[in-house]
Amino acid sequence: MGNLKYKQAHREAGFCVYCSRPAHPGHSLCLIHIRSHAKNVRRNQLKLGEVYLQSQRDRKKLRRQQGLCPACGAPAEDGYITCYNCREKLYFERFENAAPIV
């Protein structure tokens, strides 16, 4: 069984594609591998420094010029810069991270 077939079978069965543990809801990886992947991405971003930031800025600028959502690359709706999904995500994140009024 090839690697792609193995991973696809694990995704469909609800297991982590790397270790066969139950996948975290909404993901194809278990929580351990999600955290290790995030840690590696952060380490690489720090290693690349300004080069990483510049390429990210260029990617977002190009997407915006093409009429796409700068965050995810999906088609943006008329009159908006971002797509519907990214706007919803930002809207709910604001309320989740807001300080409670006491």
Image: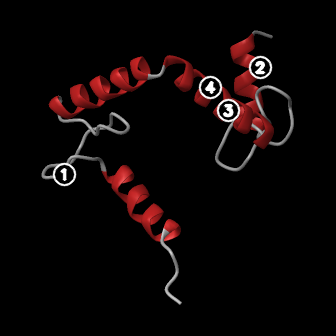
Q: Nearer the viewer, mark 1 or mark 4?
A: 4
Three-letter amino acid code at disc 1?
Tyr
Q: Secondary structure at mark 3?
A: helix
Q: Amino acid at mark 4?
A: Arg
Total tally of numbered discs in the picture = 4
Name the front one of labels 2 and 3: 3
**Mark 2 vs 4, N-terminal side:** 2
Q: CA distance from mark 4 to mark 3?
A: 6 Å
| Mark 4 lies on residue | 43
Q: Are marks 1 and 4 in contact (CB under 8 Å)?
A: no
**SS at mark 2 in the image:** helix
- Which residue is at a point 62% across and 25% down the rendered structure image? 43
Circle 4 crowding by C-alpha within 10 Å: few under 14, some 14–19, many from 20: few
Which circle marks residue 39 in the picture? 3
Q: Label 1, on which residue?
A: 80
Tell whether label 3 touches label 4 (CB within 8 Å).
Answer: yes
Percent x, y of residue 45? 53, 25
